[in-house]
Amino acid sequence: MFLQQVINSLMIGSLYALTAMGATLIYGILGILDIANAGAYLLGAYVGYYVYTATGSLVLAFLVAMAVIGLLGVVLHRTIYGPILAKPRTLSIIPLVAAVGLFTVSSDAVRLICGAGTKAYNFRFPVDVIHLGSVSIQTNWILIFALTALLLVILWIILNKTKMGLAWRATAEDPDIARACGVNTNSAMALSYILGYGFAAAAGIMTGILYNSITPALGEVPSYKMLAIIVLGGLGNPLGTVVAGL
């Protein structure tokens, strides 16, 4: 029983880490708690559902949802968060209120456009469950854990082995000094939203596959668990977020 619960917790924890990663990246570079990241989780699940239903390709569903939601994050930063943060003496509560409003709008928009009912991915492997002694492992779990690990490895490579990752770390450390040294801080901020919202979208699709159901309320629970995880992991710390999620 204990080993079974460990396996369960690793799978759920990896989803938590992936969902919270976007909020961590955005806090690290902008210093704001982006509750709207839970809206990206919700919208990603729905975009992925419609792409998968239309094409039957799970790979395409992930790619399209992550790209669309990632670009949506960049648009939100340019049109909403950027202008708010650009104003002098902006209270820290203002971008948080804006984020809560965006999350509420995303939930209600999904409810109005897609309906309030439950939608099912209906994705299944030929073998549903693998039994190893007293331990049962769903094949969906293996897919989710493998995809999560792959995305987190890609994130580590981007942040630690690329010039864009170096720009992100410099901007997160001190945006004014980074800008004075010639770092394109706008690109670093865009990277935060592309990766953060894209990862949240992927987590939403994985949740839909895991539970075989998505609803407009899908982002409500992750919205507050995400905050607990990024605080526990150290605000703006990607590695700490993974540990805290697990």
Image: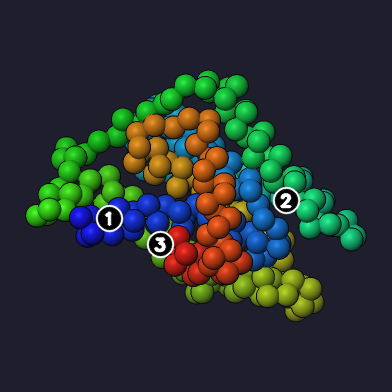
Q: Can you tell which quarter of the image residue 110 is in? A: top right
Quarter occupied by the C terminus: bottom left
Question: Mark 3 against mark 1, which lies toward the viewer?
Answer: 1
Given the image, on which type of amino acid does mark 3 rest? Leu
Q: Can you tell which quarter of the image residue 7 is in? A: bottom left
| For marks 2 and 1 on the same chain, the one whose residue lies earlier in the sequence | 1
User: Looking at this rendering, what residue extends furthest in the left direction?
Assistant: 133
Q: CB under 8 Å between callouts 2 and 3?
A: no
Q: Which of 238 and 131 is in front in this view?
A: 131
Residue on which disc 1 sits:
5
Distance between the alpha carbons at the discs numbered 2 and 3: 26 Å
Given the image, on which type of amino acid does mark 1 rest? Gln
Q: Is mark 2 on a helix, strand or loop?
A: helix
Residue on which disc 3 sits:
246
Q: Is mark 3 on a helix, strand or loop?
A: loop
| For marks 3 and 1 on the same chain, the one whose residue lies earlier in the sequence | 1
Residue 187 visible, this orientation: no
Distance between the alpha carbons at the discs numbered 2 and 1: 35 Å
Residue on which disc 2 sits:
96
Which residue does the image show at 73% across and 50% down from the upper left? Answer: 96
How far across and how far down the image is residue 11, in percent?
A: 33, 54
Is residue 111 toward the left or the right of residue 31 in the image? left
How far across and how far down the image is residue 19, in percent?
A: 50, 52
| For marks 2 and 3 on the same chain, the one whose residue lies earlier in the sequence | 2
Which residue does the image show at 63% across and 48% down from the upper left? Answer: 35
Distance between the alpha carbons at the discs numbered 3 and 1: 12 Å
Given the image, on which type of amino acid does mark 2 rest? Leu
